[in-house]
Amino acid sequence: MVLEMNDSRDLAESRPLDSRAVLFSILGFWLFYVIIVTLRAMIMDFPAQGEMALRRGFVTGVGIFITIGLWLILRLLDRKPLWTRVIAVSLISIPCAVGISAVNYYFFNVYDPAGLMDIERAFPEKDHPMIMEIAEVAISRYFFLIAWASLYLALGFSQDVREAERRTARFARAAQSAELRALRYQVNPHFLFNTLNSLSALVMRGRRDEAETMIMNLSTFYRTSLSGEPSEDVELAEEIELQKLYLDIEAVRFPERLQVRIDLPEELASAAVPGLILQPLVENAIKHGVSQTNRPVLIDISAAEAEGQLILTVTDNGPGSTQGNADHDGPGGIGLVNVRDRLAARFGERASIAHGPVAGGGYRVCLTLPLVRHAG
């Protein structure tokens, strides 16, 4: 809802083109005009070059002001459809071109107070009537204005495209954030469901002290895990600490069977990972490893770096055979599907997950993701 409101506000309050950029484009076009006309006069060796340059300057100044007026009118149509603006440019440029041409005719054909120029001698080809002279120059100035207006429309269209791209990028980020939130929120209810089942079993068996320990650990786990933003990354050291809390909870259920080994190099402690990304992996190791046998099972959590990638591995030496379908983790479960989807939403093709049974028994899940240091 907030995004929709922001997008509507963007459409209604789209900023016009930067005034400085527009003014520079106008000055650039007229400077180009002055240079070309001056070079032509020099090549054709017209007389009174200094006087002509001065008059050309007056005409150019008037042209600049008329073009600025054209811009101010076109700016009122910035939010109109493109075809409307094109038609407006085509029509409004006509009187502007005629005005510039009339000023040009006055300065070069009428205004000569000191008699500095013999117009007929200087321009023997100029024997057209005034109207034809103004019309001829107006045509060239018309296409000159059309060229500048085309540039203005192109700049406006380019800005519209950039704004649309920014809005699209915002929607894409919002969609990714929503997906990450949804996947993250799947983990906590799933874990809570299993933990409450275990807690219920402890109470029914009269193991009240162990149940109280589990409740305290559960409270600490949720207080820690829910304090962060679901769509943001956490430090790997923090993620490992959360898994230790979870394993302490499960150790109440399996005091004789659950063994844990954690290998976290100090230089990787600050690596950024999605919060609770290891939770389904450790939970699967408990469900399909520890709970499926009466012998001790070792759960090994390790981190390593390889070619700029972070490698996270969760291994158990349990039976392993029942984990073949751990992707779905039973009815209503999450398992590796959640982890795969979260990695894809967060990193795209830059992250991957591999899993399978270990020779001699057990199961291993290996996550490969970009090694990025946590901003905190």
Image: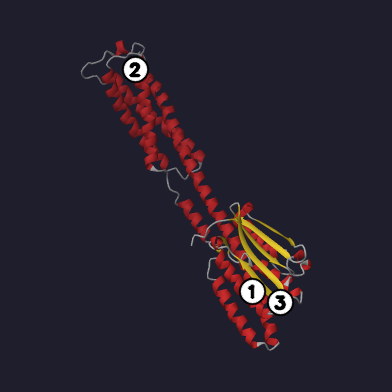
What amino acid does circle 2 point to?
Ala
Tag 1: Cα neighbours inside 10 Å, few (<14), some, or many (≥20)? Answer: many
Tag 2 near tag 3, CB within 8 Å:
no
Tag 1 near tag 3, CB within 8 Å:
no
Which mark is nearer the camera, 2 or 3? 3
What amino acid does circle 3 point to?
Arg
Relative to residue 225, is residue 162 depicted above or below? above
Q: How many angstroms separate mark 2 from mark 3 (CA)?
A: 99 Å
Is residue 340 visible in this depiction of the protein?
no
The residue labelled by disc 3 is: 257
The residue labelled by disc 1 is: 247
Closer to the chain start, of discs 1 and 3, is 1
Q: Give the side of residue 54 with respect to residue 280, left or right.
A: left
Relative to residue 12, is residue 38 depicted above or below? above
Relative to residue 247, is residue 131 depicted above or below? above
Colouring used for the render: secondary structure
Q: SS for tag 1?
A: helix
Tag 2: Cα neighbours inside 10 Å, few (<14), some, or many (≥20)? Answer: some
